[in-house]
Amino acid sequence: MKIDAKITMLFRHDGMDIEIHDDDADVTFCKIHLTQEQTCQALSRLSHTTIDLCEVHALDVVGKKREYDTLEFLFEDHGFYNGRGKRAYEEAQKVCPAGWEASGYFGSQGSFFQKDGKQYASCTIYRWVDK
């Protein structure tokens, strides 16, 4: 499978961190850490250099396209601001269309609003689809 990938190489005092990101899926799916010695070995073209740490995740969405949309839903605030974002996220999970995931971020100005005398909440939803 061919993907639209980007690589980041960060040199640090204790070695080097490498991240590989799938732009279409909008996910960093591989993180690698090399010690100073391993970094020098890899840069000197030593084949099969041992890796100090390698983490991979979200492989099920690599090669797919991430789509975004907005979800607006009725949300009775009752004037309690403590835990409002958590309550809104729980409600978003209930009303989110099948196959979509709610972002859970309710910190923007438009996250809570009134329309036609009723209280609403809004968040971004996303899903991954085949290209």
Image: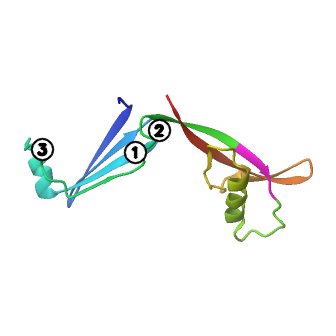
Query: Residues in magenta?
Result: 71-75
Relative horizontal placement of residue 121, taking residue 47 as reference (left or right): right
**Is residue 81 placed above or below 18 in the rendered structure?**
below
Q: Which residue is mark 3?
A: 43
* Residue 25 badge: 2
Distance CA(mark 1)–CA(mark 2): 10 Å
Sequence order check: which comes first, mark 1 or mark 2?
Answer: 2
The disc labelled 1 sits on which kind of residue?
A: Leu
Q: Nearer the viewer, residue 17 or 73?
A: 73
Q: Nearer the viewer, residue 70 or 110?
A: 70
- Residue 83: x percent and y percent? 69, 69
Name the amino acid, label 2. Answer: Ala
| Residue 59, numbered circle | 1
Q: CA distance from mark 1 to mark 3?
A: 27 Å
Does residue 108 appear to the left or right of 27 in the view shown? right
User: What residue appears at the point 14 percent right and 53 percent down from the top-left corner?
Assistant: 50
Quadrant for the N terminus in the image: top left
The location of residue 124, given as percent across then percent down, is 64, 46
Element type where label 1 sits in the image = loop
Look at label 3 and name its amino acid: Leu
Q: Taking 120 as reference, is 60 left or right?
A: left
Q: Earlier in the sequence, mark 1 or mark 3?
A: 3
Could you tell whether 76 is left or right of 34 in the image? right
